[in-house]
Amino acid sequence: MNKYIFLLIAFTLNLFAGGKWNIPLTAWIAPIFFIHFYRDTEKAGRNFLLLWLASALSTIISWHGATLFPIGVEIAFFFAVAPIGLIPYVIDRIYYRRFGSTAWLTLIFPIALTAADFFSSSGSPLGTFGAVGYSQREFLPVMQIASVAGVWGITFVMGWFASLMNHLWDNGFKFTRLSLTFAGLLTLIIGFGFMRTLLPTQPKHTATIAGFSLPNGTMSEMLNQLNVEKDEAGFRQAVDKLHAQELNQISKLADDGANIVVLQEGAVLGLSNQVEKFLDDASVIAIEKNIYIIVPTFDLGKSPAENKVHIIDPTGAVVLTHTKYGGNMFEGTLEGDKVLHTVDTPYGKLSAIICWDADFPNIVKQAGEQNVDLLFIPSQDWLGVKDIHAGMATFRAIENGMTIFRQAGQGVSVVVDAYGNQYNRVDSFAEDNKDFVSIQIVQTPIGSVNTLYPQIGDALGNIMLVGLLGLLIGLWATRKKKNY
């Protein structure tokens, strides 16, 4: 009966591991009980089904509403992908049953866990949604591991901790020389994170950056007017009115002292001539106010529609244009070339991507390679994903050693530095519906910090895939030596 109590504990903890109600510590503890439940079971097949049920149900509950899927598809999706995440538990159990609990074998589970996490996250059109390491959002010391090995390094450390704790549990918490060495290594890795947050590099520049977003539901209402109601004349009129309000807001924020003004993803939506006119009008303001303007546009006059972000400098020139490359299949827009562009300014080197783009760390690492000081991420989310998605973006700051300014519609806008320190956070769902929401005016530290991740990228994830292959070969090679 005790083993089913372990499963219940793991299920409960997993409700708070990475989803809408995230508590970082639970993601460290839940695998300990999942492992302990499954290792000792004599009925592997039946209890795998229970493991599958507990894992899938806890994920469905904690992630409900965070996907774009209808509830039925959401349930089917999580049940279908859950077995991938359970492969490490199966491999761990077989090795445990064949060779017992030794300190060296504590490496089996983290290798398999990291490989499965990397495989299921990095090859998905959804990006790295659901990666284990994201459960550590806002736990800054652990997040610093991403500066070396990306989120996969965090997955490995968490998996090794769970495996080592089970080894100690099996042995009455008596340390051997090797287990003590492994525990010391884990302590040093986490200690590195604490030291990194305590001894930050001072930023090179500071700028007053202001951002604003549209009231929740504005974009969908306007798109419905054009695409569902087929009221082009009414749509044009509504767009012209919105653009006039946005231009006035940019001017107001500039008068309030902003050096740079940022709008949310798709804030400048409209037909092609309307988008072009807005860019021309914004250029005039940039010249008059001597400011930079980050202008995200959603051009519905193109086929397919184009979701872009532009940077206008104080001369009125558009000095950077980026086309969104993440999630295009879901919104039906032109897919970008996945190349990050930069522009040198008095405030450091700037770059910009859009929302879902930030979920692909192997592409965003171009920013670290080019020593970008400040990355803008205009975004558009929804209620169920707002905290998850904003938290994911902060890892890109740590991986690449740069400041991030994320201006989100229908979500959480954040400003974080190269260590993940939060300088501002505003939730559009916590505000009244008014002309504009999520207004930020932040004295923003700007500067790049050297990190290892842009140089090695996802090397650890790929090494773990090779390691997983080795583990599978090892199981085949030893299949007749032990009963399990």
Image: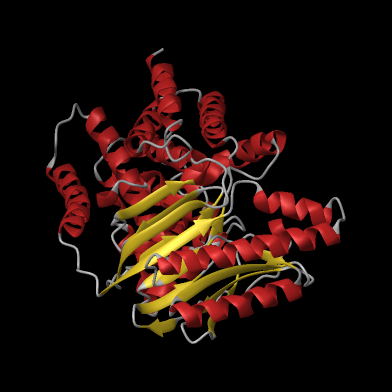
Whether 338 is drawn above or below 54: the answer is below
Q: Which residue is located at x 68 percent, y 76 percent?
A: 277
Residue 140 left/right relative to 180: right
Nearest to the observer: residue 425 or residue 86: 425
Q: Is 344 in front, or is 368?
A: 344
Instruction: Name the quadrant containing residue 145.
Output: bottom left
Percent position of residue 86, x then y: 50, 39
Q: Position of residue 211 (x, y in %)?
A: 46, 61
* Coordinates of residue 346 in the picture (x, y in percent): 34, 82
Q: Quadrant of residue 205?
A: bottom left
Q: Is residue 122 above or below residue 310?
A: above
Question: In the picture provided, is 50 more to the left or to the right than 401?
Answer: right
Considering the image in quadrants, where does the N terminus appear?
top left
Number of callouts: 0
Q: Quadrant of residue 245?
A: bottom right
Q: Quadrant of the C terminus?
A: top left
| Residue shown at 35% from the left, 44% from the top | 159
* Most distant residue in the top direction: 1
User: In the drawing, does residue 47 fall left or right of residue 337?
Assistant: left
Residue at the spot 56% in from the left edge and 80% down from the top edge: 283
Residue lying farthest to the right in this orientation: 230
Return the residue nearer the eye: 477 or 382: 382
Say if residue 477 shows up in the picture.
no
Q: Nearer the viewer, residue 339 or 57?
A: 339
Q: Position of residue 118 (x, y in %)?
A: 48, 55
The colour scheme used to paint the residues is secondary structure
Q: Is residue 237 visible?
A: yes
Q: Residue shown at 65%/40% (left/top)?
A: 77
